[in-house]
Amino acid sequence: MFKLFNKTYSEKEMTTFRFLSKNKLFDTLTNEELAEFLPVIHKREYKENEVVFFAKDPSNALYIIKNGIVSLNLDIKGDFERLIVLRNGRIFGDNVILEHSKRIYTAIVTSETAELWVIPRINLEEIMDNDVQIKAKLMTAIAREYDEYMQNLFKGYKDAYGFFNINMIYHNG
């Protein structure tokens, strides 16, 4: 397909593109590809201590922190252990890209208020189904992110406990 003219975007759209591109999930997408997400981003307001989602909930949306702070926590025998604290611009709930996935942590707002941009799974799937380039870029980004998570997990375990039996990580029962 030949494009005679490139689409021009408003300053508001360009600001949104710059904001989204700061995250690894979206940083390889072109403005034209990012524009596909504009109509499906929903803005949600949360208050301090409000749960965005619980561990084991179905992964139904991707979340981007526009303003505020969100803590990702593991539920261990009724108590929460904080994994990480995320601030403006960070994405969480990215396993939504994987079919039939469930949340592996609980997300809780820890700032007085938070504005989150939410992209529902159904809209993500539709965008990826309609544009294989976007799908390939998002899947590559998620694979890189998960590779980084695994490297950090292995390093943390090795630093804490020394050498370990790799079968412990890959054994399912």
Image: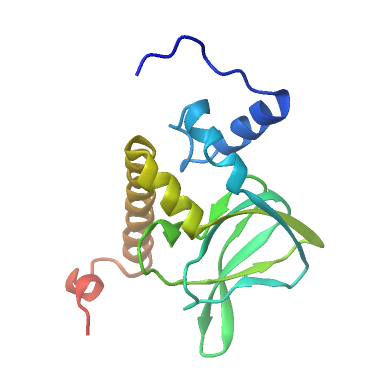
Q: Is residue 14 above or below residue 143?
A: above
Kindly identify the residue that appears in the image at 53 percent across and 61 percent down: 61
Residue 9 vs residue 110, the one in the foreground: 9
Q: Position of residue 125 (x, y in %)?
A: 42, 53
In this picture, residue 144 sits left or right of residue 55 = left
In this picture, residue 172 sits left or right of residue 109 = left
Q: Position of residue 13 (x, y in %)?
A: 66, 30
In this picture, residue 78 sits left or right of residue 151 = right
Q: Position of residue 96 (x, y in %)?
A: 44, 60
| Image color mode | rainbow
Q: Quadrant of the N terminus?
A: top left
Q: Quadrant of residue 3?
A: top left
Q: Quadrant of the C terminus?
A: bottom left
Residue reaching furthest bottom? 77
Q: Is residue 87 above or below residue 48?
A: above
- Is residue 71 visible from the viewing direction of this image? yes
Residue reaching furthest top? 4
Kindly identify the residue that appears in the image at 42 percent across and 60 percent down: 95
Kindly identify the residue that appears in the image at 47 percent across and 67 percent down: 59
- Is residue 138 visible from the viewing direction of this image? no
Q: Quadrant of residue 132?
A: top left
Q: Position of residue 79 (x, y in %)?
A: 58, 85
Q: How many marks?
A: 0
Kindly identify the residue that appears in the image at 37 percent across and 38 percent down: 131
Q: Is residue 171 above or below residue 34?
A: below
